Structure formats: C-alpha cells, structure tokens
Amino acid sequence: MRSVEGWRPLAQDGLLAAVMAALLSAVVLGTPGTGAVDLAAALAGSLALVAWRRAPLVSLLVGTVCMLVVTARFQAGPPASFPVLVSVFATVRAGHRLAPALASVVFLGVDLAANLPGSDGPVQVLQDASLLVGWFVAAGVAATVTRHRQAYLEEAERRAAEAERTREEAALRRAGEERLRIARELHDSLTHSISIIKVQAGVAVHLARKRGEDVPPALLAIQEASGDAMRELRATLEVLRDPGHSDDPDHPGGSGGSGGSGGEVAASGLDRLGGLVERARSAGLPVTVTISGTRRELPPEVDRAAYRIVQEALTNVSRHAGGAAAAVRVGYADEELVVQIDDDGGADPAAPPVPGTGLLGMRERVAALGGRLRAAPRPGGGFTVRAELPLGEPVRAGLPLGGAS
C-alpha cells in the first residue's frame, strides 16, 4: 500500500507532463515556420513538469528557459505559458518568492516584446498581456492559499496530537493519584486492624503455651491468616505506590515470581492450597481436596485466579453455610484448568443468593482470562462454584505442587 501511494504522485506528474507535451507539440507542429529546435524546447519545457512537485525550482528554471525559446521564436500564444504557470505555482507553494517573481516578469516581458511587432494593435497586446498577468497572479495567489491551508492543517494535526498526549498524561496522573489515595486508605483502614489481630493472636498463643495449655487450632489459624493477610497487603500497597515493581522479576510482587504477577505476592497460587485448606479446617470447616490430571506449572494469572477462587469459595462456605463440608476439585486438562468447590450446606435452588462482592470478583477474574464461571445452588442442596480457566500452551509438565490432600 505504501509503495502504491508513493508512486501515485509521480504517475500524476508524468501524466501532466505528457498532456502538456502533447498540447505544445500540436501547437508547434501546427504553426508554419517552426522547426526541430522549437519542438525540442516545447517538449523539454513540458517534461520538466515531472519534477514540479519534488524539485519546483528545477522545474521553474528549465520550463521558463524552454518556454522563452518557444515564445521568442514564434507566437505560440497562451499555451506557451502553461508550463511556467505550473512551475510558478509549485515554487510559491514551496515557500519561494523571488525566483517565481523573476521568472514571471522575465517571461511576461519576453512574451510582450515578441508579440508586439506582429500584433493587431496596442490594445490587443495589452489585453493579451493583462490576461497573462492575471493568470500568473492567480497562480501565485492560489499557491499562497494552498500553502497556508497546508500549514493550518499541519498545525491542527499537531495541536490534536498534543491535546491527545496531554489528555493521556492527565489520565495517567489522575490514575496515579487515585492509586496513592487507595493505598493510603488501605493502609489506614486495614493495616492497623490486621496488625492488632496478629499481635493479639500471637500474645494469646504465647500465654497459652506458657501456661502449658493446648493452643486452640482456631487461634493458630487466626495467627497464620493474619500474617498472610499482612504480607499480601504490603505487596499490594507496594504495587499501588509503584506500579513499575509489578513488572520487576526480582520484586516480591513481580510477574517473575512463581505463581504471581501484577503485584500480588508470588506465593498466592495453587502451591499454597494446602495451607489454605489447613486454615479452613482449623476454623472448623471440613474440607477435602482432589487433584486430577497431570500437574504442571500454570500461567501466573491462572494460578493466582484459581487460588483466589478456592479462597473465596471456602470463605463463603464458612460464612454462609455453617456446619457444612466442602469438597475442592482441581482438574488439569490440556487446554484448561477446572476448579470446582462443592458444599453440602442449605442453599436452595429455588432461592439463589444475591451475588456479593466476592462472587463478582470471581466472575471478573474468570472473564479477564476468557474462561467460564458457574456459581449457583446445587439441585440436591448446597452450593457449587465451578471455574474453567483456559491455559493456552503448556509451560512445563510434571512439576510438584504442594497442598494436595
């Protein structure tokens, strides 16, 4: 396409030169007393128009000299001025002033001197000269208008590009300010509370062990969960304050870590499924885990999404289906990863729950990966969350993943 567009102006210029050469050749051959010199000058002046767009000064010089030869040798009439007019237009449009003005004055003077002896009278000569002067003035004015219009269009395009760049910079600046605001809000509202929970749980565990008592499993689960929450919250805050770290392979929340990217801690993947299940069991939720298929390293986004889906599903079972048991199934297929969490709670198919923030978040994660999610009550009672996440091309097969039970 670019080659065609590049050749199109040259083809148009060649066609213009050919038409002009044919017209002047007809004038020369139709005028008695002309010879080979006149025909050669007419052809050379016409063919010089091939360069009127790319080299306007060259076209003006060659065309003017050749047309002066034609005009001086015989009365060619207005057609002899056509190549000079086109070249004057081109040079004025290119920003030149002196060269087209001199060429116009010289050509008009020679044409007037050559036509004066054989004219029908001074009035006719002045009329013809006035016509040519009008043509040359019109060519200069048209070229000036065209040049100013082109400059205006270029300036408008430049301003549009500058405005677009400014809008993008403003949007990025607002996004950065919003990230910092969210980071401050998260730090002020969550970090302090989670830290207190972690400290209080640690104190309770320490006192129980100091008194020789058995530490309740729920208390240990609270201590471990609060530690994980603090670690992930810190990683999230770091990414919010400096998004560039999310692309740094050596950064804790970078995409180069195993199983994590985009600012979440690298360990938040299915390799931590065992710890997640143990915490749920410590909190009193019976959980079984079944893993089928050939385990392999997953794309970071899929690994993280699968972990978060299981985490959210088990949290919902604990909150909304007290006393229920949960079954987690992870299936590795060639083209997708299937994660399914079933519970035997009291969810009624006739009265499906209103989706909350957790379910909406799951749907957004799965939709972002191009997968499918089903979250609905089971026909026999209980609730099912099933996510089918596309894997793309396998990375490496046979890697051990912890947390199966």
Image: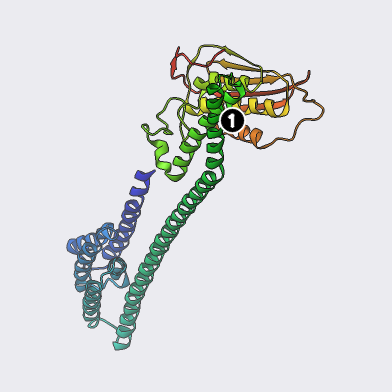
- As displayed, is residue 59 above or below residue 213? below
Circle 1: residue type: Val
Q: Quadrant of the C terminus?
A: top right
- Residue drawn at x 54%, y 11% as measured from the top left: 293
- Comparing 29 with 315, the one in front is 315
Furthest residue to the right? 350
Furthest residue to the front? 211
Percent position of residue 378, x then y:
75, 21
Q: How many other residues sit within 10 Å of disc 1, few (<14), some (14-19) or many (≥20)?
A: many
- Residue drawn at x 27%, y 82% as measured from the top left: 119
In the rendered structure, the answer to whether residue 32 lies left or right of residue 371 reads left
- Comparing 6 with 124, the one in front is 6
Count the marks: how many? 1
Percent position of residue 125, x then y:
30, 83
- As displayed, is residue 55 above or below residue 371? below
In the rendered structure, the answer to whether residue 275 lies left or right of residue 249 reads right
Furthest residue to the bottom? 122
Colour theme: rainbow
- As displayed, is residue 202 above or below residue 123? above
Q: Quadrant of the N terminus?
A: top left
In the rendered structure, the answer to whether residue 102 lies left or right of residue 202 reads left
Label 1, on which residue?
366
- Residue drawn at x 64%, y 25% as measured from the top left: 314
Location of residue 339 (image quadrant): top right
Percent position of residue 216, x then y:
61, 21
- Comparing 267 with 360, the one in front is 267
On the question of residue 305 being in view, the answer is no
Percent position of residue 308, x then y:
57, 28
Location of residue 404 (image quadrant): top right
Q: Give the SS element for disc 1.
A: helix
- Residue drawn at x 50%, y 37% as measured from the top left: 233
On the question of residue 357 being in view, the answer is yes
